[in-house]
Amino acid sequence: MSQTKIIDGKAVSAQIKQQVAVQVSALNEKGIQSCLAVILVGDDPASRVYVNNKKKACEVCGIRSLEYTLSAQTTQDELLALIAKLNQDPDVNGILVQLPLPRHISEDAVISAIDPAKDVDAFHPINVGKIMQGTCTLLPCTPAGIMELIASTEIPVAGKDCVVIGRSNIVGKPMAMLLLHKNGTVTICHSKTKDLKQKCKAADILVAAVGIPKFVTADMVKEGAVVIDVGINRLEDGSLCGDVDFDGVAPIAGAITPVPGGVGPMTIAMLMQNTLTATKDQNKVS
Ligand code: GUN
């Protein structure tokens, strides 16, 4: 049996951030700054960590970051007014509203209020449509990061049987589209899928985005498959664990992402890439 490759998301993400930093600095020489506005509503501790990590990545890339921390009682109208202001501000290139939002605020209304040109999450319905067409310059961060990780294995997607477990708007659905655009044959599985085990076992590329710790076990994985674990689950003992039973699956897989240190760091790297792309598009430079 050939050796399993552990895909190093930290290393790939550091490389991408480095490339973004070089391009941001080239823009600076033309007198163009890049700026990302991040809005956090409420005090969800996990969201706080994500927002802090986004700020740190901006620093690494030379992107200016603006943080708006709003109380959990902020009304939807107040949030929409802030978004409208940032949409109008020519110095702001990217706008990200950290999800989830408090229950009294409609995520759909908020996402739809962001100028699609500044929508660095690529969640706006216009961008979702363009992702389906393959014409969106802003890519959904987690799926785009996963495509980079797959590319790092040098295993081509074309003609491969790809199985995505999970059909969320943030990961599962756009993931399927990006794999399809690379000519993969894609199956999206979910909680109502029958014969899930057999479908997974037929996959050359298996992406797990279910949110259930160690859901994917060794008997569900084909020998030599590329296994991508999107899950970040906190166990009772405080440790982090993915959707894949890493210890069981790693000896079978051809390549596998660890948790942490796999997909997680890629999402932020691609956010930096999108902020750079948005800045270039808005300034009409390549
Ligand atoms: N919350 C969890 N994932 C994400 C993401 O990719 N973008 C935003 N804005 N919020 C999130």
Image: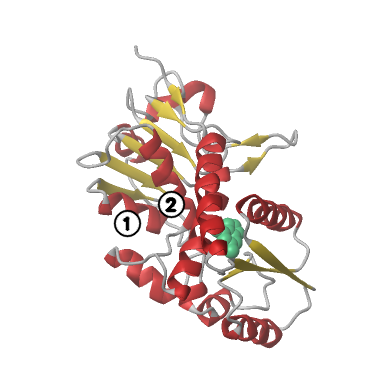
Q: Residue 220 at what x, y percent from top left?
A: 38, 30
Q: Are marks 1 and 2 in contact (CB under 8 Å)?
A: yes
In front here: 178 or 100?
A: 178
Mark 1 vs 2, N-terminal side:
2
State the quadrant of the N terminus.
top left
- Direction front: furthest residue: 29
Say if residue 242 shows up in the picture: yes
Q: Is residue 207 left or right of residue 62?
A: left
Query: Of the residues shown, which amino acid type is indicated by label 1?
Result: Met
Q: Residue at x 45, y 30 (%)?
A: 256
User: 260 and 214: which one is in front?
Assistant: 260
36 w.r.t. 10: above or below: below
Percent x, y for residue 116?
46, 76
Name the side, left or right, on which 111 lies relative to 37: left
Q: Residue furthest top?
A: 1
Classify mark 1: helix, strand or loop.
helix
Report x, y in % for residue 30: 52, 67
| As drawn, 244 above or below 265 | above
User: Which residue is disc 2 drawn over?
Assistant: 143
